């Protein structure tokens, strides 16, 4: 696969030009490096109006043949997966490519035995254990569409996603370990499935030995399901444009939407970006600390690395357990060469003091990745100095669930670096900055709305069950462009710096939430009349959630009301969406037509009340004064 790898910045510039001059030829050459059961009839057909985007149309493949079978001859005994448990005293587990192949095939046969077929949706709600990777790949092996749900979401969120996808099966575990805590996954699934009718069976992995309640003729233990199943399983023949997975993500409207990725383009793009951004070499060990419940885990723990024949590390735990040196200890233990984490993790570890990182050698490291949110200069420098020891390059990966793979980033040690800048686009990616009127800004040293003007192989194809929503969210703001929802700045050399979201999306510790989604959750509380949620800067989480809430007049104990609201959000979405600040107000600032003026609330939440603009035209201007006075 090394043929895919760019080796110098000059080569990058050449490839980039080629990719813009003749994108089809460029991607066709890359696609040639994969195993296809049948090659494509056309490389690309597209229009951003419907939108309809088809890559490698007519081609047949199975992504797992590329991620597993293809490696068996030369890399059968190479480590594919190293699993590091939550508790450092517990033994770690390793799978060679051959072992992983056998486990995937065996579980794929178990899925088939339970009636799962090509096109069926399977929800996966699991701990960060090897069986999660195995379950994902087993679905892909038989052409079932996986929908992984992050195991921090509540039963209500799970039910919403299961129902939206009309999933036929759920794969889960009795519970999971996260630091010193344990979470009863199976109990949450039981609660969720009370509201779902499409699920016919549940497979439960015995992770903690908890013996949860098992419903007869619906729930089956993983070990029973695989018992007696063969360790080989023919790979289902998939069309390049058949769906590979759905992954739910939040947008500016209430309900999370199911972003759909397809087999061929996603395969080509995740492998290409992995090999280039991380400059992976054959004997390297690569570790991404994300959870497979998010897109980063899909593309850069599972698919990108395994498609490239890499050794990928998977970690069950959290950065601070049992102490804030855990990441660095794992790097030294497994001699990790490429490491990818999130700015929020870096900032939280910085806050514990340098001594935790200084006691590890970290000699093996070559490339450090950061992803999920803008990285501030201070965190960038700490990462560079204390983790990278000024030897390693930092690759700041900008991308989204919808883009499938990294879009703007440095490439290992071959690109110029600039703190807090993601850098240059990956070959094949054509970013543009648009002004208020939607016109392209040609100059450098400028900022604007970040859009992409040409398709790349792993662009989302639709949002599950609602194509119109895909069109409205991404392709209608600016005709002829994919709209990212982000603003960006371009410096004098053409490097990009991401400035954050321009829509009603809040990024808390790298997790995306729509303001409407959190408001809907808060409003389900019987005492809440209405609410408005905004994001504000937070030193560790990047952004945090501030809720302005109007209660009905019967409420006497505000502390109790706060507690209840917190409980409601935990039940509706999960702990990850908790508002850090809840302010009770007598009314919300609204225009005469009833629109909530979030701009004003955002300023108040940020503590910047010196210039709130003209409030005299509001429905009730006095309410702003009251909110400012009582701001938290
Ligand atoms: O605002 C951008 C921010 O995260 C959003 C995408 O979130 P999600 O789909 O959950 O994917 C996260 C992992 C790819 C983007 O619209 N974002 C992501 N990476 C960066 C970033 N902002 C700045 N710099 C980044 N490297």
Image (cartoon, rainbow, N blue to C red):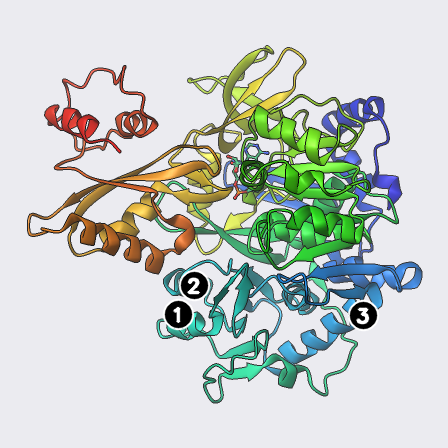
- Nearer the N terminus, badge 2 or badge 3? 3
Neighbour tally class for label 3: few under 14, some 14-19, many 20 plus, Cα within 10 Å: many
Q: Position of residue 344 (x, y in %)?
A: 54, 39
Q: Residue 192's mark?
A: 1
Report ligand 1 position as a quadrant: top right
Pointer 3 residue Cβ closer than 8 Å to ligand 1: no
Residue 99's mark? 3
| Disc on the earlier residue, 2 or 1 | 2
Q: Residues at badges 2 and 1 in contact (C-beta under 8 Å)? A: yes
Above or below, comparing residue 506 to residue 289 in the picture: above
User: Is residue 282 shown left or right of residue 390?
Assistant: right
Asked if labels 1 and 3 touch by Cβ distance under 8 angstroms, the answer is no
From the top left corner, tell me how far across and down residue 609 is, in percent.
27, 20
How dense is the environment of label 2, judged by Cα within 10 Å: few (below 14), some, or many (20 and up)? Answer: many
- Dot 2: what SS? helix
Residue on which the image places disc 2 = 158
What distance separates the C-alpha of mark 2 from that of mark 1?
6 Å
């Amino acid at each position: 696969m090394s043929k895919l790898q760019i080796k110098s910045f000059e080569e990058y510039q050449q490839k980039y030009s080629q990719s813009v001059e003749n994108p089809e030829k460029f991607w066709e050459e890359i696609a040639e490096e994969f195993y296809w059961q049948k090659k494509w009839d056309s490389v690309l057909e597209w229009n951003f109006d419907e939108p309809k985007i088809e890559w490698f149309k007519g081609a047949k493949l199975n992504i797992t043949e590329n991620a597993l079978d293809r490696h068996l001859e030369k890399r059968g005994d190479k480590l594919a997966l190293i699993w590091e448990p939550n508790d450092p005293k517990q033994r770690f587990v390793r799978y060679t490519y051959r072992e992983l192949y056998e486990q995937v095939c065996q579980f794929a046969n178990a899925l088939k035995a339970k009636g799962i077929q090509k096109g069926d949706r399977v929800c996966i709600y699991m701990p960060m254990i090897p069986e999660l990777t195995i379950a994902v790949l087993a679905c892909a092996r038989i052409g079932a569409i996986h929908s992984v749900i992050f195991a921090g979401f509540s039963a209500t969120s799970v039910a919403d996603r299961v129902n939206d996808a009309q999933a036929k099966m759920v794969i889960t575990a009795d519970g999971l370990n996260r630091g010193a805590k344990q979470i009863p996954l199976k109990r949450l699934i039981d609660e969720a499935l009370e509201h779902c009718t499409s699920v016919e069976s549940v497979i439960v992995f015995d992770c903690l030995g908890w013996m949860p309640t098992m419903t007869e003729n619906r729930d089956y233990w993983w070990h029973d399901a695989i018992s007696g199943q063969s360790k080989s399983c023919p790979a289902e023949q998939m069309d390049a444009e058949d769906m590979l997975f759905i992954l739910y993500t939040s947008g500016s409207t209430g309900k999370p939407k199911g972003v759909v990725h397809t087999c061929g383009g996603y395969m080509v793009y995740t492998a290409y970006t992995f090999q280039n951004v991380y400059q992976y070499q054959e004997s390297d060990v690569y570790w991404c600390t994300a959870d497979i419940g998010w897109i980063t885990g899909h593309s850069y723990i599972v698919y990108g690395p395994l498609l490239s024949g890499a050794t990928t590390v998977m970690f069950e735990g959290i950065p601070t357990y049992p102490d804030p040196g855990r990441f660095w200890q794992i790097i030294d233990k497994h001699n990790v060469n490429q490491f990818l984490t999130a700015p929020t993790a870096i900032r939280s570890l910085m806050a514990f003091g340098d001594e935790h990182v200084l006691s590890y050698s970290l000699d093996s490291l070559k490339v450090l990745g950061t992803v999920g949110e803008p990285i501030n200069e201070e965190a960038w420098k700490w990462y560079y100095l204390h983790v990278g020891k000024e030897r390693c390059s930092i690759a700041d990966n900008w991308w989204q669930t919808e883009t499938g793979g990294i879009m703007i980033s440095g490439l290992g040690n071959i690109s110029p670096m600039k703190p807090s800048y993601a850098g240059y686009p990956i070959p094949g990616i054509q970013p543009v900055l648009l002004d208020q009127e939607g016109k392209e800004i040609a100059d450098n040293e400028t900022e604007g709305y970040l859009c992409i003007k040409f398709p790349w192989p792993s662009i989302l194809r639709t949002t599950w069950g609602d194509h119109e929503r895909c069109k409205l969210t991404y392709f209608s703001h600016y005709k002829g462009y994919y709209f990212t929802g982000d603003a960006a700045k371009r410096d004098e050399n053409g490097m990009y710096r991401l400035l954050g979201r321009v829509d009603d999306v809040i990024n808390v510790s790298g997790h995306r939430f729509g303001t409407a989604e959190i408001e809907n959750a808060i409003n389900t509380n019987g005492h809440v009349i209405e609410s408005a949620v905004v994001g504000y800067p937070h030193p560790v989480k990047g952004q945090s959630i501030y809720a302005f809430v109007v209660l009905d007049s019967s409420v006497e104990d505000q502390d109790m009301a706060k507690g209840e609201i917190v409980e409601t959000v935990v039940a509706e979405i999960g702990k990850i969406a908790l508002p850090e600040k809840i302010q009770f107000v007598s009314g919300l600032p609204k225009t005469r037509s009833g629109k909530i003026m979030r701009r004003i609330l955002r300023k108040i939440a940020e503590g910047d009340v010196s210039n709130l603009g003209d409030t005299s035209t509001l429905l009730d201007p006095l309410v702003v004064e009251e909110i400012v006075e009582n701001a938290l």
